[in-house]
Amino acid sequence: MPSTVIGSVQGVDARYVLKPGEGVDAIHNTEMYGYGAARIGAGALGGTGLAFTLGGGNELIVAAIDHFGQALVGREIEELMAGFGRVFRSIADDPQYRWVGPHKGVVHLALGAITNACWDLWAKARGVPLWKLIVDLSPAQLLAAIDLSYLEDVLTRDEALALLDAEAPGRAERATVIERGYPGYDTSVGWFNYSDDEVLDRAKEALGAGFGALKLKVGSPDQERDVRRAFALRELVGPDVRVMVDANQQWTLPQALEVGHKLAPMHPFWIEEPTHPDDVEAHRVLARALAPIHIAAGEAVPNRVIFKNLLQADAIGIVQVDASRVGGVSEFLAISLLARRFGKPVVPHVGDMGQIHQHLVLANRIALGMPELFLEYIPHLRAYFTQPAEVRDGRYVTPTRPGASSDLVPGAGLPGGPGSDSGSGARA
Amino acid sequence: MPSTVIGSVQGVDARYVLKPGEGVDAIHNTEMYGYGAARIGAGALGGTGLAFTLGGGNELIVAAIDHFGQALVGREIEELMAGFGRVFRSIADDPQYRWVGPHKGVVHLALGAITNACWDLWAKARGVPLWKLIVDLSPAQLLAAIDLSYLEDVLTRDEALALLDAEAPGRAERATVIERGYPGYDTSVGWFNYSDDEVLDRAKEALGAGFGALKLKVGSPDQERDVRRAFALRELVGPDVRVMVDANQQWTLPQALEVGHKLAPMHPFWIEEPTHPDDVEAHRVLARALAPIHIAAGEAVPNRVIFKNLLQADAIGIVQVDASRVGGVSEFLAISLLARRFGKPVVPHVGDMGQIHQHLVLANRIALGMPELFLEYIPHLRAYFTQPAEVRDGRYVTPTRPGASSDLVPGAGLPGGPGSDSGSGARA
């Protein structure tokens, strides 16, 4: 049997230049994606864990990964994951580094990357894809890998166990999604700087490719531009295709109310990130004012505690937690349990380009009984993954190879990236 | 006239070993304080800006300061500060680094350090202490140095102007505090690992030194220890001295309710950081359940948006914003304006050991009409500041020298610290 003892943990700074217009929204305009990635070596096996970025700041995450990762060296992966919730908390509560979070920002992204690398390695050690690893864990084993602290007022460990047990009967029925494939939706039709015509052309292509849901970037200083494009897209796709709009935090609350009411007649399925991601109360006000349009948020929400507040306030109808933003797969699952408890669907943001989340939505569907909605699809980094996600007829093809589909092509991307001679370390 | 054009901005990694027991609370136990500091050079003048840490993670803040600081090189300080609110927002919204916050964690601490260095340099360029710089600005000038975005639903710029104008009549009366000195309170009597006897001995000393308010660390896994020490301290000091207890985020909400009710009969003036700092709803519940005991929080609250939510929910009665945690003096003032708007006092946490905040409480008192309460005093780093704060008869002696009292003694602290040959840069 090959060694599954962790021999090394190293940060990797991966940056990828996108094509013109790709990835650009109302605030992020540099056409670059990146990962502060954790790379675990364990004998012949390797685990890769992703924290998503826009390139800049990778050097900070990599430095934090290099620091935190040392605590894992020498641990055997099965033994580690049998109590990973405690390990997670001990890193999150490092008595010095905790201060520069806590549980948010650079240090939490580093913890997330390390956590994701551990889950990837665990699945590879067992020779199964991540989704299968998770659905085959007993409820007690699953919860042992998760830190549920600070959720006690709404979800105790016993309540989480009962919730998982209660979902056992319908598992076989729900597992039929494995064969069919999980539905996708296309984010890349409507980047912010695409012309009106370009958006419509790409929307036609997406419909032709089988997608039944599309997203448009809004949040322009020119409100009329946002409204014009949204209505044109609705007119093109008809009433039955779901259209989502995404303001990337660029509205004040008064502006969000104003534009939201203007957009309501084109029936967006959700309005995403209408204002500052920390502003739970503003999201609550918007959810009340704009119902039945859903308010969606999560890509910039760092941890389970803020998701708890968002759910307690009924401030979001769609939980867009991203395992490459929060503390990795473990905290993603904690937040999914919370969402289940509050009866809200998890529709992840995919900073990982869906690589990890194609596993996690299957696990949420089968083990947690989460509704089958759709998973965001962004194809811009396909060339940089060794096993890029496959979408056919608008559905993700269920991955079968061991692990979390997170491994990056060595030597690809900008110099200093994964597998290059310079290895990890700070970059200007 | 000396040049006030910024020639350089550099991060400085300053770490200081404390004496046994000092600075230790229920979660932070390494007896070390530190600063990720920004050092601005401008001809013969220099500005120092502090972001507080517990040592570890300084290297991340320093790297971010080195990155963000380049945008300020070549700017003249008066011209810069005349529109610093816009500069602040442009750094906070850097299109790549924004993602690894946003507006929190390492990148926000770096922005805070840079902001503080700019205010220090500005005051030195004018030859006045920081408090005088601030109180001599017109309301319009003051607001131009602050980013009020995302507060529009509760405080527009016009409303902030009106608030400042309305406080003008009482300024002369309130300015008498300059002569008397701002009252202090003593945090260092009750560190977590001090024995019961040591706490009582130090409390007696503090009373003898003129302090009328003391703080005790709680948050122990052993609730009876917390309760025993709190009642013993109350018995020693009598009913008229204010005693505050501080749990440093270590209770779940159910635990906080339980211990809070046990502590109520000893009449703590406030209970500080009862649970996770991101959990606005839990603070709201506690404030309702434990009134008239105040809930205090802020040392781990990263920005004005979360303070806005805390105030909207009436979740905290004491606003413990720290200018060495949030985006520096500018965001401290934004949060103070918010607190004034909601009628809550600002009683800063002093990661800066009161060096900057001795100025800011005077500015808040005189310009904003904030009530005169007391400012935390922690003497553990006195040897490392070139102009350490002076407390006499329980009151801060109003600083008279130009600047924000933030300059660190060169070469002091651990190797690699301020003014050492190695300068800034990453440290393991």
Image (cartoon, coloured by chain):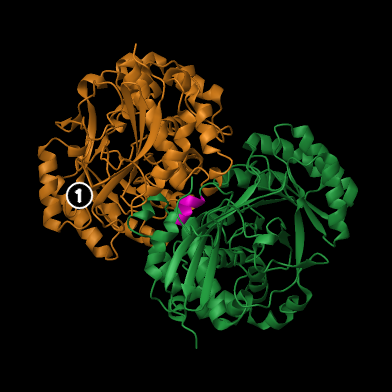
Chain colours: A orange, B green
Q: Which chain is home to disc 1?
A: A
Q: Residue at position x 50%, y 42% from top?
A: A103
Q: For the residue labelled by badge 1, is the local secondary structure a helix, a strand or a loop?
A: loop
Using the image as rendered, state which of residue A373 and residue A349 is in the foreground.
A349
Q: Which amino acid type corresponds to the residue marked 1 in the rendered image?
A: Leu
Residue B207 pos. (x, y %): 86, 57
Secondary structure predominantly adopted by residues drawn in magenta: helix
Identify the residue under disc 1. A18
Q: Residue at position x 60%, y 67% from top?
A: B406
- The answer to whether residue A328 is left or right of residue B297 is left
In the displayed structure, A15 sits above or below B176; it is above
Using the image as rendered, state which of residue A243 and residue A412 is in the foreground.
A412
Q: Residue at position x 24%, y 54% from top?
A: A24
Look at the image and tell me whether residue B153 can be seen: no
Asked whether residue B59 is drawn in magenta, I would say yes
Residue B314 pos. (x, y %): 62, 54
